[in-house]
Amino acid sequence: MAVTKVKKRQGSKKTKKAWRKTDIRDVEEFLEDKRLEERLGVSFKDSKDEDLFTVDTAPDSSNLEKYEGFQKERRNKIASQPPRCFANLKSDSKVPDPIAKRNRVRTDEERKHPVLRLKEAELKSKGILKAKEITRIRSRQYNAQQKRNKPKPGDFSKDLWDEDKPLPGEMNSEWVLQPAKEHNIANSKLKEMVIRYSKRSKPSKIAAIESPHPGVSYNPSFSAHTELLQAIANKEMELIKKDKHIKRVTSNMFQRIPREQAEADWMKEMSQGVPVLDAEAAKPDEEPTDNKDFKAINPPTNRDKKKDLKAKRKAREEKLKKTVRERTKAEKKKQTDLHLLKRIQKDLDEAQEKVNLVTQKRKAVREASVGTTRRLGPRKFEDRPEDFNLASDLKGSLRSIKPQGNLLADRFSSFQKRNMMHVPPAISGKSNRLKAKKVKRYKKASHKMEWEINPYERPGYLKKKQAQSARALGQK
């Protein structure tokens, strides 16, 4: 079969549409190669083989020292260069910038005036520095010292707890309180706190996950399952007995009687001891016939019976004697109390012994309650009822057995049992809702009537006052 040669289409080139049909891919590839050579700086044709290729050769044992020196020099050169992570920020093109002079933000040192720069250099040569420069130098020295004093990794020869920093001079003053001194002592009580924290016991000795009763298993033994059911039955019997006792001593203790009889009994009970008044007894008593003169407790005084000077002197002497007797009695009591020191000391010893006994009892109770469930909230902790399956619910496989219990409720109860959280109010049955505050209501001045603002403008106010005045004048 003969291959027919396609004749190249000839068309007008005077429009842009015609030029688009021309294949210029070879031209674009050539120009792209030229641009790449310009970016790399040297063309591949003009480059030497040594610049394009490298030959890796292992060093000889004789030139090992020379090789190590070369590697050290190479490492120093790499360390002096900027990190490779910043290579993307640099331009990898060898094409020179068409704009040779660009605007650049000058540094603070470049923006300084030459006269000021010379003046600062002169002051620095004389040893006169700025406060900022002095602070910077001290910070460098302090950081260098801290770096030198920093222990090396794995060096534990230094005991951090044996060093107690002394108090500053101003803290040793007698005017500084002890709490302020304790607050400013660095690491003085830290060792004691760490030791106390390390010796501190756990909130509870109860295991985080307790092993269940063997009778809870999906395939328990007959004795374990019977023991579990018997324990649960005993608990239920105790609850039933408690409920019966409460009903017996409350509602069942009183008889049911009608309302009318209860009111009659109440009236009869309230009227016990009240005398019943007859018609004749209700008459008022006759006036007493005793017409004796009334005498006051203190008889009336008379001007002629007033005290003379002798009586006043006698009263003063008697008052002075009374004061002397009271003071003498007080002094005798003080001397007598000195002989009671043994009895007082004995009473104090007995009181201290009682206090020590109570302290020991409380300490024993506290030690005995360590690790047990405590009451952390408004309600005492009540353990969840134990899960169980009846004999009819037991199956031979886990797929067909009826699941019992709730994992979330079990973990929640375990936290409460191990003193890690208290019983929340929502569970304890107490309402946590706050009482609504009473809103103070008042009437705005713009909503008041005229007589509410000024009582004299109330309708009929003047007539009412006039009538009151007329009645008052008529009574007089």
Image (tube, helix red, strand yellow):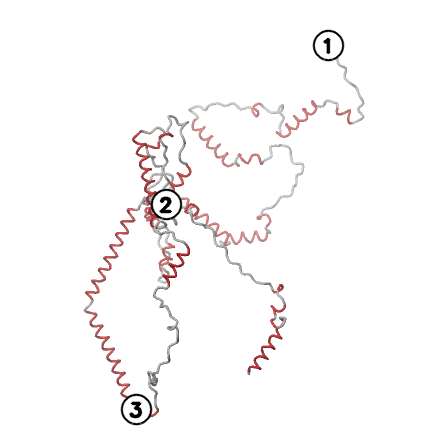
Q: In the shown orientation, is residue 423 left or right of residue 231?
A: right
Image quadrant occupied by the N terminus:
top right
* Residue with the mark numbered 1: 3
Q: Which mark is residue 381?
A: 2
**Amino acid marked by disc 2:** Phe
Q: Earlier in the sequence, mark 3 or mark 2?
A: 3
Q: Which mark is residue 309?
A: 3
Image quadrant occupied by the C terminus:
bottom right
Q: In the shown orientation, is residue 47 left or right of residue 142?
A: right
What is the x, y in percent for residue 282?
39, 73
* Residue drawn at point x = 35 percent, y = 64 percent: 272
Dividing the picture into quadrants, the one containing residue 119 is: bottom right
Dividing the picture into quadrants, the one containing residue 273 is: bottom left
Q: CA distance from mark 2 to mark 1?
A: 101 Å
Q: CA distance from mark 1 to mark 3?
A: 172 Å
Q: Can residue 347 be seen at all in this image of the molecule? A: yes
* Residue drawn at point x = 62 percent, y = 66 percent: 449
Q: Nearer the viewer, mark 1 or mark 3?
A: 3
